[in-house]
Image (tube, rainbow, N blue to C red):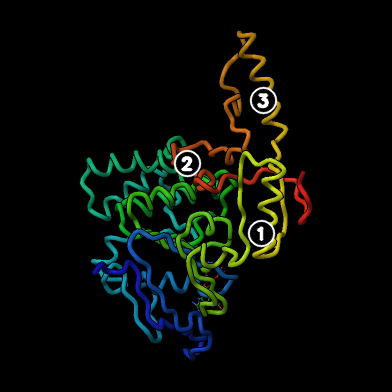
Amino acid sequence: MTVAAILARNLTKDYADAFGIPRIRGLDGLDLEVAPGQVFGLIGPNGSGKTTTIRLLLGLIFPTSGSAEVLGHPPGSVAAKSRIGYLPEETALPRFLTGEEALEFYGRLFDLPRQTRRRRIAALLDMVGMKAPARRQIRTYSKGQARRIGLAQALINDPDLVILDEPTSGMDPAGSREIKDLILRLKEQGKTVLLSSHLLADVEDVCDRLAILERGRVRTMGTVAELLESRDEVTFTARGMDGDGIAEVEAAIRRRGELLSVSRRREKLENLFLRIVGEGRRGGGGAEAGGPGGSSGSVHGSGPAPVEGAGLAPGPGSTPGTASAPETGSRSGTDPG
Ligand SMILES: Nc1ncnc2c1ncn2[C@@H]1O[C@H](COP(=O)(O)OP(=O)(O)OP(=O)(O)O)[C@@H](O)[C@H]1O
Ligand SMILES: [Mg+2]
């Protein structure tokens, strides 16, 4: 039996007020099991218990009741800590060190040999797109840059479990896309990731499972498909259908259920333009090849262009079967001919 990466049973935390009287229930009876290699997302409004969960799992605070295990060890134990990477909600980095020096410092804390440190720091700086600013002091960094160095720091010990508290906070859209790609790459490497976020799209795109917290309680938990897929609406996409074929399918659907819409895929004007202009150019020659989109772009709408930077893997937008929806002209239940 494989050991769960994260296990929590009825985990509860009451915070005390200034007089030591427990008044605020930060987390209320959390049951959670995250299998190794999964990406798990915690979402919820401010004050719903996300950071409390994370801090309990790290052993930074102690539960009022219930229990937890990380990688088969008690939270906060040396065995657990050496295999966890943590990006706190607020990046706390030594401001007067350069990014590179800070990573060097954390690498030493983990007793990494000099050669390993060098190699890993170079790879991490490349991965988070911070090669150039790494020579500057951290106090000069923008919010997003500090976040990136924080992320590199969380990965310095090559952890098996990566815990990220709002990893994309302060990031621009391209930056948060890069973080998402990075999380998917960590997953590819077999690492378990626990992340909290306010950006629902982030969670939807990268998480295998997620929990929605509210006032310390889990309101719902499951795989993204379980929580988001419609149970009774289905979309078919077909090619090579003539009017009769479409009528036949429509009739079949009407016999079994309700036909909600029939639509034809519509090409993007940009694609049409590039296809036509591209063809013309190929004939004439001389013009530069490989312009944006190119003439080879599918008529059927390719996914969003991957964000450049840090040489990261293609993003979730390129998942097969989820190609971005082309614009469609829909009509409800009408004859499409
Ligand atoms: N040290 C503390 N002392 C007292 N109450 C606390 C403490 N830390 C958290 N709380 C309370 O516990 C509840 C959960 O807080 P938590 O920080 O876990 O929320 P969160 O989901 O991370 O919110 P956010 O999205 O704002 O980061 C809140 O009501 C918060 O005020
Ligand atoms: Mg928080």
Question: Does 139 appear above or below 37?
Answer: above
How far, Cα to Cα, is label 2 from label 3? 23 Å
Q: Position of 44 compared to 3: left or right?
A: right
Task: Tell me what residue is drawn at x 36 percent, y 69 percent.
Answer: 58
The residue that label 3 is drawn on is 274
> Looking at numbered disc 3 in the image, what kind of residue is underneath it?
Leu
Where is residue 281 drawn, in percent x and y? 64, 14
Identified by mark 2, the residue type is Pro
**Helix, strand or loop under label 2:** loop
Relative image position of residue 226 (x, y in whole percent): 51, 67
Question: Which of the two labelled residues, at mark 3 and mark 1, occupies the earlier sequence position?
Answer: 1
Residue indicated by mark 2: 314
Relative to 243, is 269 above or below? above
Residue at image point 37% right, 43% down: 124
Residue 225's place in the image compared with 130, above or below, is: below
Please give the residue where the numbered disc 1 appears in the rendered image: 253
Q: Disc 2 to disc 1, how far (Cα)?
A: 37 Å
Q: Nearer the viewer, mark 2 or mark 1?
A: 1
Q: Secondary structure at mark 3?
A: helix
Kindly report which numbered mark, 3 or 1, lies closer to the viewer in this rendering: 1
The amino acid on which the numbered mark 1 sits, given as a three-letter code, is Ile
Q: Position of residue 76 (x, y in %)?
A: 31, 71
